[in-house]
Amino acid sequence: MNPSEKAASSHPVIRTLTSPAGRALLALLLVLLVGLIFNADGAFFRPGTHRDALRQASVYGILACGLTLVIITAGIDLAVGSVLALVAVCGAKMAIHWHWPAVVVVVASLLVGAACGGTCGFVAARLRVQPFIATLAMMVFARGLAKYASGGMKVSRSFGGEFVDLPPLFAFIDKRILGDNVSMVSVIFLGCVVLAWLALDRHRWGRQLYAIGGNEDAARLSGVPVVAAKAAAYVASGVFAAIAGLCQAAQEQQGDPETGGGYELIAIAMVVIGGTSLMGGRGGMGLTLLGVLTIGYLEKILSINAVPEAGRLMLTGLIIVVAVLTQRRRPA
């Protein structure tokens, strides 16, 4: 690097723009600029458009919260979409068909998610199986279990020849607040962001996850309980997937064993576009939040402009590749 390039790279503005946070924020601003230009006859300026964009991204964002914890350890969790479907089916059965109290439904659903995540964590951390393989196996198993639990059919409000009322838990999750301007599922998503941020930035466990992702052998030699910390990351990912499953069931007002297909890929894209490194050791919840907003607004802008789904998928794939390539450049 010649002296002029070195001087330019040392400029505060340049350092900010080339940092992961700077690149993630710039990507979000570019997407919003596209929305301002291609506003679909003013649809982009309506409050309902922004409310719906955040609501539609919230389930993916909740999954991304758990995936951020796992990816920081240099792991991956492909099972979250299937765990979401399993919890959606179980939650719908407990709430709609069995009329269990809301607290019991929530606790039981979180335990289902924690069990799935804990199994992945045990196989990946204790048995030292590649996380890709461990979570791929759980992805297939949980999807099959969801279909078995539901009998291969949607768990709907039509049951035993009758049409039952929507459970209070589902009505609460699916409602809007603040004058119908904010969806409750978006509030739940923001709560998950705060919880994951506290775990990463304000707790010893979060520092352990960064250490493991940076250099697992060095972390082990430094006294970090690698197996327990990594397994806990997968448990947390399963719990967040369970929360997303309840939100999905509430919004659809049913438990669909086929729901959540491909959700893990979109959530991973949100984490990566935010700037969390797939190699581990770098990233955070602030970056993931930017990634969720970027993908969420991109999907909404393409939707209101009637861009076909095929085009949206291809564009999202291209953006993921670009995001990964920009991660290779480290700030000077």
Image (spheres, grey):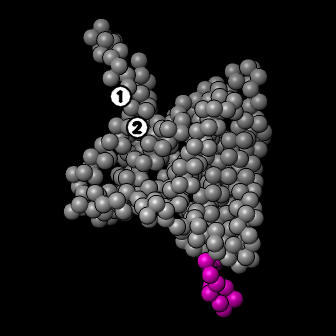
Region of the chain picked out in magenta, as a range = 152-166
Main SS category, magenta section: loop
Residue at 65%, 90% (x, y): give it: 162
- Say which of 326 and 275 sits in front: 275
| 216 is higher (above) or lower (below) than 186 | above
Q: Amino acid at mark 2?
A: Ala
Counting residues from the N terminus, which is met first, the one under dot 1 or under dot 2? Answer: 1
Tell me how far mark 1 sits from mark 2, CA to CA: 9 Å
| Amino acid found under the numbered disc labelled 1 | Leu
Is residue 160 in the magenta section?
Answer: yes
Q: Is residue 56 left or right of residue 236?
A: left
Horizontal and vertical percent position of residue 281:
58, 29
Looking at the picture, tell me which residue is in the foreground, 183 or 279: 183
Query: Is the residue 297 above or below the residue 207 in the image?
Result: below
> Disc number at residue 69?
none
x and y percentages locating residue 155 in the rendered image: 64, 76
Residue 106 can be seen in this image: yes
Q: Which residue is rendered at x = 63% and y = 72% of the image?
A: 168
Considering every residue shown, the one lying at the far top of the view is 3
Q: Which residue is more in the foreground, 132 or 268?
A: 268
The residue beneath circle 1 is 17
Q: Return the x and y of residue 83 as percentages of the image width and height.
A: 65, 58
Which corner quadrant of the image does residue 243 belong to? bottom right
Q: Quadrant of the N terminus?
A: top left
Judging by the rendered image, the residue that carries numbered circle 2 is 24
Q: Is residue 154 left or right of residue 228?
A: left
Where disc 1 sits, the SS reads helix
Q: What secondary structure is found at the residue carrying circle 2?
A: helix
